[in-house]
Amino acid sequence: MYPSRFRYEAPHSLDEAIGLLRDGGDYAKVLAGGQSLVPLMKLRFASPELVVDINGLPGLAYHRADADGTLRIGALTRHADLERSGLLRSTQPTMAAAAPLIADPIVRNRGTLVGSLCHADPQGDWASVVLSLGGSVVAQGPRGRRSIPMADFVTGPFQNLLDPDEVAVEAVIPPARGERAGGYLKLERRVGDFATVGVAVSVEISGGTVTRTGIGLTGVGGSTIAATEAAAALTGQPLTPESISQAAGLAAGAARPRTDHRGSAEYKRHMVATFVERILTGISRGDADTAERAA
Amino acid sequence: MTMVYDDLGDEATGDVPVRRIKFTINGDKKIAEVEPRLLLAHLIRQGLRLTGTHTGCDTTNCGACTVLVDGVAVKSCTMLAVQADGHHIQTVEGLATASELHPLQEGFKEEHGLQCGFCTPGMMMAAKALLDANPDPTEEEVRWALSGNLCRCTGYQNIVKSVLWAADKLRSQAAE
C-alpha cells in the first residue's frame, strides 16, 4: 500500500515548519512519529498534499519537571522514552502505568505522546491519561503560543482544536496539590490492538482526603470521555469502599460504548466500573503497581 | 540508485517530487532518489534488493518488516524512505558475516525458532535491539520485547528459547 502523492518538507526550525503549514493550509499535515498518520495515509483515509516532517526540529525531545512540579513533554518525546522514565515512575503513577501499554514495543520506539493527543483517536490511551490529570496542549503558530486544556482540545473523533498552521509543541501536566496516586488499566484482545476499554484514574490526596480526581475513559464513546460526576463523587473525602463503588457506577454511566467485534456495550460498560474500582481500591490499599494489561 | 514510479496518468506524474537521500544500509553508504511516499520497507526490498525484510500485514501490526534505524527497532512499513536521510539502517542481511552466522541466527537454528520463516527476520531484528540494550534478559523480558512481532506458526515458545540461546552465546563470546 502506498500513500497518495504528496510534497514532503523537513524543516530545521519551528518557525520554518509553521511557515510551511501556513502556506499549506488545510491540506498540510504534521508528521512526528507517524505511527498513526502513515497507516492512515497508506489506507488513503488521509491524503495530505503537504507533509511537514518535524523530526529534524531541535529541542522537542524532552520531558522534564519545572521547579513547581509542572511536567512538560515535548512533541518528539517517544512513548519508549516515557516507558523508561524514572521521573514518571517517581512522580506520575497514571502516566507510568499507561506508557508500557501503548501499542507495542516497536511502535513505542517511534510514536509520540503529543502526536497521539493530536490524532484524537477515541481509542487512544494518552488522551484519557492527560485528561485525567487536567493537562493541556501547547500550540504554536504564526500568532504565537497558546495553551489548550485537554478537556477542550479534542472536538470529536480524529478532530482537534489546532488551527491548520499550528504545531502542537508540548503537553503540560499541572503539579499535584498533595500526594499523587493513580493508574491506567486497559483491556485489549492482544498486544498492539486498540483498547476494548481503557480507564485512567488520577487522584491527589492531602491528609487522607482526596483533593482532586480525574477519570478518563478510552474506547467507550465517540471521543475520550471525562467521567466528571464520578470524579466529583470522590473529591473532598477519604477513599472508602462506598465512595469507590459509587464512583465506579457513575463512571460506567458516563461511558457511551457500542457493541462491536471487541465486545458488547454492556460488557464494556461493566469493565469501566471494574477498572475504576480496581484502580481506586489499589490506591486505598497503597498498592504500588496498578498497571495491568488485562487479557 | 534508480527507482521506477507508477505512471498514474495524472498531472502530477510529470512532476514527481523526488528527493535525494543519503544513508547507510548494513554499513554501506548509499545515495537514493526517492519519491516521498515511498516506504522504507519498499526502498529496502525493491530499491536495495534486500528481500530479507518482509512485508507482512502492511498495517503496523505484524512486525515482519522490523529493521533497526540508528539501532532502534522500527516497523519499516510505517516510516517513509525519505526519513532515512542521514540515518543508519540495519536489516537481517547485516547480521551474518561472509563465513559465520550471527548468534541470533544460530539460536533460531539450534532451538527450531522458525517454521515458515516469514516472521523470522523481524523477530531477529527486534531481538537484536533487545540484546544490544539488555545482554542478559529474562524470559519475560524477551516475550515483552517481541510482543510487537506476530508469528502464526510456532506459538512463540521456540522463538523465546532461540533468543535466550543467542543471549547466552553472545555473553560467553563477550567474556572470552
Image (tube, rainbow, N blue to C red):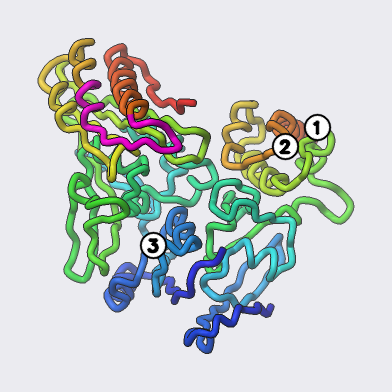
Dot 1 corresponds to which residue? B111
Quadrant in the picture for residue B174: top right
Q: Nearer the viewer, mark 2 or mark 3?
A: 2
Q: Is residue A33 magenta?
A: no
Dot 3 corresponds to which residue? A58
Name the one closer to the observer, B111 or B89: B111
In space, the residues marked 2 and 3 are separated at their CA atoms by 44 Å
Could you tell me residue B112's position as x and y percent?
Answer: 81, 34
**Secondary structure state at the residue bearing disc 1:** loop
User: Residue type at mark 2?
Assistant: Cys
The residue sitting at 22% across, 46% down in the picture is A150
Q: Is residue A88 visible?
A: no
Q: Is residue A261 magenta?
A: yes
Q: Which numbered marker is on residue A131?
A: none
- Above or below, comparing residue B81 to residue A222 in the picture: below
User: Would you say A118 lies left or right of A34 here?
Assistant: left
Q: Residues within 10 Å of mark 1 (few under 14, many from 20)?
A: some
Q: Residues within 10 Å of mark 3 (few under 14, many from 20)?
A: few
Q: Chain of mark 2?
A: B
Could you tell me residue A266's position as x and y percent?
Answer: 33, 27
Mark 2 / mark 1, whichever is N-terminal: 1
Quadrant in the picture for residue A122: top left
Q: Is residue A3 visible?
A: yes
Magenta highlight range: A248-265
In space, the residues marked 2 and 1 are separated at their CA atoms by 14 Å
The residue sitting at 61% across, 78% down in the picture is B5
Could you tell me residue B88's position as x and y percent?
Answer: 62, 61
Dot 2 corresponds to which residue? B153
User: Residue type at mark 3?
Assistant: Pro
The residue sitting at 24% across, 35% down in the picture is A132
User: Residue type at mark 1?
Assistant: Glu
